[in-house]
């Protein structure tokens, strides 16, 4: 299975192609760009999924299937769909009892792939996990890295409650830190705005005032709160 970070790099390579390509070509380009080993099989499965979503066209089936970009190929739309599906998919591997990424790594990393390689190497691995949490809202260890022999995932406990006021909004998810992905307006005059973020399910609703920003754990909840506020404002104060 591909991580969100791998998906981002692969999609960037795909979007650069003006001609046809296949999974082997994309995999080779990924390895050359990142220096990270990657098998072509998960890349092939991912490209086929992107095709089924309508963002790629199949040029030649069989063997290494060749593709080209569809006219409606949209990098952000693909990322949004894939990041949310990964966020939910890896929850089946979530572990409990860890209060931090540091504790998760120490408890579940195979020593020979972590601390056993020296402090500098372990620090690099730990920073990668922390960056995954910042970008995606979770981090994972593969079956090759985990002492369990299976995937394990760490999801930090949300630091904000549903509908909690966001006192300091810095154009990023107040929980995971991902950048703003989309803005959705509600009301005839756009009285309410809902922000979604890159790589996590969170959203924020805002009435445009400094103290009017609220945190929500999903777009659906944020959209419901925004629509309700628009309807309440249209009715006006009771009495």
Image: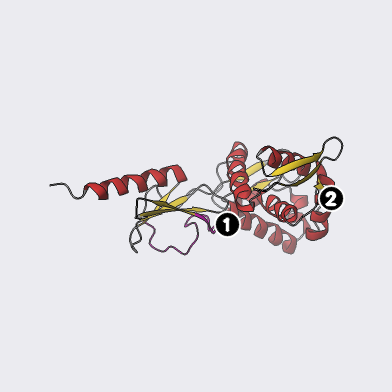
Magenta-tinted stretch: 165-182
Q: Which mark is residue 134?
A: 1
Considering the numbered disc 1 on the image, is that residue within a helix, a strand or a loop? helix
**Residue 205 shows in the view:** yes
Q: Looking at the rendering, which quadrant does residue 168 occupy?
A: bottom left
Of all residues shown, which one is farthest toward the front? 71
**Where residue 31 appears, x then y in whole percent?**
82, 55
Q: Residues within 10 Å of mark 1 (few under 14, many from 20)?
A: some
Q: How is the image coloured?
A: secondary structure
Residue 193 image point, x, y percent: 40, 54
For the point 71% across and 40% down, the residue is 51
Q: Nearest the camera: 43 or 142?
A: 43
The residue at the point 77 percent across, 55 percent down is 18
Front-lying residue, 24 or 129? 24
* Disc marking residue 68: none
Residue carrying label 2: 25
Q: Nearer the viewer, residue 20 or 179?
A: 20
Across and down, in percent, residue 40 comes to 82, 44
Left or right of 145 in this view: 137: left
Q: CA distance from mark 1 to mark 2?
A: 30 Å
**Residue projecting furthest to the right:** 63
């Amino acid at each position: 299975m591909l991580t969100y970070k791998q998906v981002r790099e692969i999609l960037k390579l795909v979007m650069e192609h003006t001609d046809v390509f296949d999974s082997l070509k994309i995999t080779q380009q990924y390895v050359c760009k990142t220096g990270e080993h990657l098998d072509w099989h998960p890349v092939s499965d991912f490209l086929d999924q992107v095709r089924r979503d309508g963002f790629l066209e199949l040029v030649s089936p069989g063997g290494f299937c060749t593709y080209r970009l569809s006219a409606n190929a949209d990098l952000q739309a693909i990322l949004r769909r894939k990041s949310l599906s990964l966020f939910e998919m890896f929850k089946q591997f979530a572990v409990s009892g860890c209060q931090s990424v540091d504790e998760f790594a120490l408890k579940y990393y195979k020593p020979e792939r972590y601390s056993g390689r020296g402090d500098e190497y372990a620090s690099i691995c730990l920073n990668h996990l922390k960056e995954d949490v910042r970008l995606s809202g979770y981090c994972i260890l593969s079956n090759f890295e985990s002492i369990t022999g299976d995937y394990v995932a760490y999801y930090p406990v949300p630091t904000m409650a549903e509908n909690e006021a966001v006192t300091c909004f810095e154009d990023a998810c107040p929980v995971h830190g991902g950048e703003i992905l989309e803005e959705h307006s509600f009301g005839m005059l756009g009285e309410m705005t809902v922000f979604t973020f890159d790589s996590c399910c969170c959203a924020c609703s805002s009435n445009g005032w400094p103290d009017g920003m609220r945190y929500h754990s999903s777009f659906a909840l944020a959209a419901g709160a925004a629509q309700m506020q628009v309807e309440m404002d249209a009715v006006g104060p009771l009495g």
